[in-house]
Image (tube, rainbow, N blue to C red):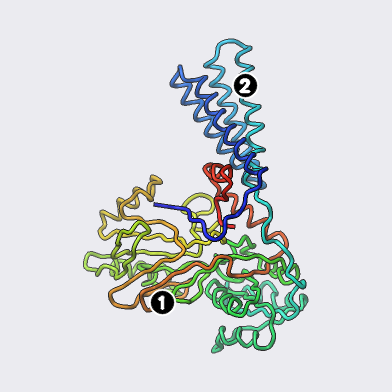
Amino acid sequence: MTRRVMSGAPVPVSTRRRLAAVAALGGMLMLVVLVVGLLFDNLGTVLIGVLGLSLAMAGAWWVVTEPGPRRAAGAMGLIVGLVVVAGSVILAVDGTDRIGLRLAAILVLTGVTLPCARVAVVRPRHGARVRAGGRPSRPVLLCNPWSGGGKVERFGLLELAAELGVETVVLDRGLDLEALARDAVARGADCLGMAGGDGSQALVASIAVEHGLPFVCVSAGTRNHFAIDLGLHPEDPRASMDAFRDACERAVDFATVNGRVFVNNTSLGVYARIVQEESYRDAKVETTTTLLPEILGRQAEPFDLQFTTPDGREIDGAIMLMVSNNPYVGAGRDAGQRRCLDRGVLGVVAATTRTGGEAARLLAASALGERRRSAFWWEFTATEFEVRSRSGVAFAGMDGEALELDTPLRFRIHPRGLTLLVPEGNIEAAERRRRRDLRATDLLEIAAGREPWTA
């Protein structure tokens, strides 16, 4: 139930990349045909060969799409896979000459396919430019001194800001962050930054969008989801501060629900109900374990949430529903993260289990990697999405902030609507993250002249 949605004007693919994709696809097909064709007489050998070929192709994909240590690990997987394939070929083919010929053909095809695949998937740098007019002349950084256990003070962000010529405004008890940000704009700020958690990032970013100003995300929160998904260093907010000096522009999406901006996600159902509790901030585990039986027990009322899927199905009573600014990765290295923030789509996931048995079936399907096939799991993308409730209100957790919102909730994506200033090198880091989201089928899209992502 997952679909990829393109939005906005089509992005042209160069002839060079299209030809490279065609060559890579042809090389992959010929490798499969060659190996399976050689081994078809012996089932055991075929299985060994297919296993080796799978390992080699997985390793090759890491070589194509990953940097550093993971590329080295991919190269090792490729070598081991080719050795396994070679061994199976030796078992299946009689004659030294024929063995050498087949192995040479496999090596040549691999040597052609890998570089072609890499050329195809590496798109030209897009949107990476220094801000017109250079670095901002009157940047203002708003700081939450309590966020992330006191990262602002621990990393010396106020002193670093002074060195960079950035005015700082520190949030104090009783002060209103939105009012402080608006005051900074009124005083002539030409760039707003936020050193704090995700909820604060979203609020200040919304004011930057409203006034057409660039925004700087400084990873001074506890979890730093937005910073991580941007490709910024989550544990080193000083590195994020380089954005004020380097002033490289980058445009990403943001999302709204009933006009309110969020940069990560809005959760409804179980999580939204739990975060409403005053005790949740200081005792997350205890609060959750106390409330779950009350929320999900046999006597619990079904959740008052309704929505319509893209194929027209009416869903009622989702116990968990999350709408995100671009979809999250469900498994693997980047599980719980977004590899791209510029696809121009919302990610929607929901669970509709109502009994312990249904929950067990969903968990079993998840463990087997078949969650998307479950009747109790919904996952899709959209540019607009609506959630209804009969009561007219719904609890929500928006970028970690507990809210109660009027329904219907109308979600909308705003493609490339947020202009960021990022440190030099962040564009390349974001490109590496995006590349990990590619699949072999994306080569078909590129070969046909279509980008498999939103630019």
Query: Dividing the picture into quarters, in which one does residue 455 lie?
Result: bottom right
Q: Residue at x 51, y 71 (%)?
A: 262
Q: Position of residue 321 (x, y in %)?
A: 38, 64
- Residue 389 location, quadrant: bottom left
Point out which mark residue 18 bears.
none
Residue 162 vs 18, above or below: the answer is: below
Q: How many callouts does the rendering have?
A: 2
Q: Where in the figure is residue 53, as x and y percent of width and height?
A: 54, 30
Give the labeled residue for mark 1. Answer: 279
Horizontal relation, residue 247 to residue 279: left or right: right
Number of residues whose C-alpha sits closer than 10 Å to that of mark 1, classed few (under 14), some (14–19) or many (20 or more): few
The amino acid pointed to by label 1 is Ser
The amino acid type found where label 2 is placed reads Leu
Residue lying farthest to the top in this orientation? 95
Circle 2 Cα neighbour tier, 10 Å, few/some/many (<14 / 14–19 / ≥20) = some
Q: Earlier in the sequence, mark 1 or mark 2?
A: 2
**Residue appearing at x 62%, y 74% in the figure:** 195
Label 1 to label 2: alpha-carbon separation: 65 Å
Q: Could you say which is closer to the camera, residue 45 or residue 135?
A: 135
Using the image as rendered, state which of residue 14 and residue 320 is in the foreground. 14
